[in-house]
Image (cartoon, helix red, strand yellow):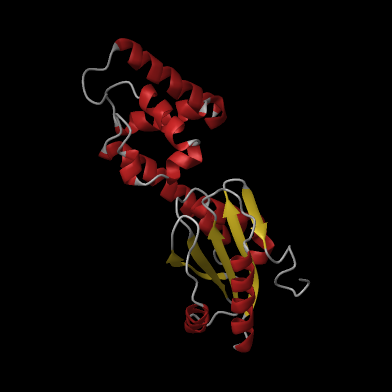
Amino acid sequence: MTGGAVKPDHLGHRKRLRERFLSGGPGALADYELLELLLCQAQPRGDMKPAAKALLKRFGSFAGVMAASPDALSEIDGIGEASIVALKTVQAAALLMQKQDITEKPVLASWKAVLAYCHSVMAHEPIEQFRLLFLDTKNALIADEKQSQGTVNHTPVYVREVAKRALALDASAVIMAHNHPSGDPSPSRDDIEMTKAVKAALEKIGIQLHDHIIVGRKGHVSLRSLGYIDGAK
């Protein structure tokens, strides 16, 4: 519950959490304890352990909590506006750091960072979204944009719009990425056919499709690695 006086045992517990965190780092705390410590910064009064455990139970993991929508977070008892802002601020900071890791650098030389960024942005989203990463002649990131958003198992992709936006940004190459909310990143037949259509459209205007990454909670799949972009399949 929010509000009310903080009992002495809560004060001692919070102090011990802070000390363990400062001395041992985040690895010294269980996931629910790290969430609890964060929530304590947003709500300085009350016991936040039940709320932290409820968040993990509802959303499945620390990453799932961070990716949850404000409306979904507010359904958890004890989670108010201040806690939601704290959680979403941590998510925004993590995504910003990951995006900066791939900005103004040769993306293909930082492929693990690209995959980590795509996974963080989309893996826990409840509906499909389709993103485009536009690259310059040195394969540095020009822009990262969400082109469309769909349903739990489909998102519309407009080949003409992909090509049009790439031209507008004077991009030399494109990386496509989308998520599978089911958790399984295996490509569907539609995913494969759409990839081939976008590749063909971009080739006509002198722009390369580097890859199409599909991400899910269970991992990721590269359609180039599967042979669907280089013509092997």
On the image, the x and y values in percent for residue 175 come to: 59, 69
Residue 148 position, x and y percent, is: 44, 67
Q: Is residue 109 above or below residue 45?
A: below
Q: Residue at x 56, y 52 (%)?
A: 119
Percent x, y of residue 59: 45, 37
Left or right of residue 135: residue 125: left
Q: Name the quarter where the N terminus is drawn.
A: top left
Residue at (27%, 36%) from the top-left corner? 80
Among the 4 quarters of the image, the one containing residue 199: bottom right
Nearer to the camera, 172 or 148: 148
Residue at the limit of the structure toward the top, as seen here: 8
Residue lying furthest left in this view? 4
**Residue 106 shows in this picture:** no
Which residue appears farthest toward the right when viewing the image? Answer: 232
Q: Quadrant of the C terminus?
A: bottom right
Instruction: Count all numbered tags in the image, as a single digit.
Output: 0
Horizontal side of 149 relative to 218 (left or right) equals left
Residue 74 in the figure: left or right of residue 130: left
Specify the farthest residue to the front. 189
Work out whether residue 54 can be spotted: yes
Residue ID at (68%, 64%): 223
Residue located 57% across and 46% down the image:
217
